[in-house]
Amino acid sequence: MSRRDPLLPNAGIVARREYRDRTRSPLFLASTLVLAAIAMLVAIAPIAVRYLDRQTVTRIAIVSADADLAQRAVSIADTLLNIPPPAADLAHWSKPYLVEVLADAAVAGRLLQDGNLGAVMIAQRRPSGQLDIALETKEGPTSARSQVLSVAAFGIGVLDWSARLPPDAGRDPFMTPTYRVDQVNGASDGGTPLDTRQVASRYVLGIMFVILLLISIVVYGMWVATGVASEKSSRVMELMISAASPGQMLTGKVVGIGSAGLTQYAAIAGPALVLLAFQDRIASAILGPDWVGGAPLGGLTPALLVGYGVFFLLGFVLFALIYAAMGSFVSRPDDLQTLSLPLSLLAMTGYLVAIVALGGGTGTMVLLASYLPPFSPFVMLARLMVSAVQPWEVVLSVGLLVLAIAVVAVAATRMYAAGVLLYGQRPGLRTFIAAARRG
């Protein structure tokens, strides 16, 4: 077996060449600046949303078998939750909470899981006359809303006791209502439930992470496909494939162009994270001292950063391998738009399911998508941000993703080896399958 000439290209040489050519391109600098500006706009979006819409109404449901008790609960909760700020213009101020009665606890629970309710307060009267009030919410017992509703529970007990006083002098002793918070599928930090600000921070960060993952996969995946298609159209690939193996060429493309993309990604994410870190100060300067937002990075932990990095890298590698194999089948870079549409739809599907998960959705579709590649990088990341996920679920999701990458790498290498020599034919599903079988 002859020794390979050290001047011939291998995976490392191909990767370094691709990285150097990409990062030195004027288009690289221009696109980096544009995407960095977009990322900073995304980071500052919560302030704009708060500025444009300060009157978001949160629904609170009261469930009780006693109609009179339910109405008293509505009256007390509405009074305590909808206290106008001291400097508010009452002529234009709207109540931030809508407190209403729901007769069916099961229906209220489903609405809470779907995100249509902010909380459900269940009031029951024990045989002794003492009230038992349970608050079902996705927030923790230390959140501001839970604390206010604990005061409401006491007020409900006082009002209910006074309303049931007999007309004569005899009266039963007052018994303080019991009050507990039942958190529904809530995220925690080291076993400690998150407060309202941390929950809001996790939600905003989750949206940002999922959007950046989607943009990175689509944009940098197309970089990989375009690089392969350009070399094929110029016939340069025919010379390179005779000196390096298809596996080395494919690895070099993914590593080189992918590293250039991740360099750009770091330049994009850095300014956005800086803006997030100082978002409260910027918001206070723009919106005034009545800004209530919470530290945007307050809910971020090292474990979440590690999880984001793992799912980002694995998801990018999975899609980049598919994009590279796809690029080897086109004779002109212009033909990539048609072939890239199915991959973009796959990534968009994962993004949309992740948005559902960020909104508190825990249905079968969300659970399955969090384990199933290529959707798992989006959906499992979203679940980690806003809900309680068991360690075995993360291990299973990562394991299936790694297994999928291994299978796709083998198939992509075979398709790449066959596709680089395929000219003048319109690629289709049968062509891809036949190439994956032949190798």
Image: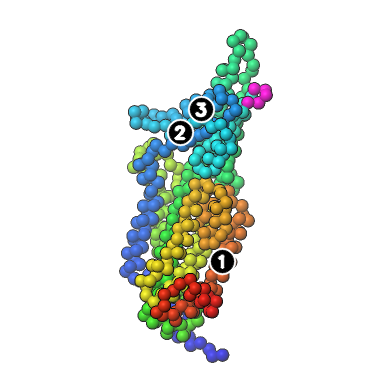
**Whole-number angstrom distance, CA of label 3 to CA of label 1:** 52 Å
Q: Which mark is first along the chain, 2 or 3?
A: 3
Q: Secondary structure at mark 2?
A: strand
Spot occupied by residue 67 in the image (x, y as percentages of width and height): 56, 25
Q: Amino acid at mark 3?
A: Val
164 inside magenta stretch: no
The answer to whether residue 223 is above or below residue 181 is below
Q: Amino acid at mark 1?
A: Ala
The answer to whether residue 64 is above or below residue 29 is above
**Pointers 3 and 1 in contact (CB under 8 A)?**
no
Q: Which residue is mark 2?
A: 97
Q: Which residue is mark 3?
A: 74
The answer to whether residue 248 is above or below residue 51 is below
Who's the residue at 34% across and 61% down the image? 33
Q: Which mark is first along the chain, 1 or 3?
A: 3
Q: Which residues are magenta?
A: 125-129
Of the pair 396 and 255, the residue shown nearer to us: 396
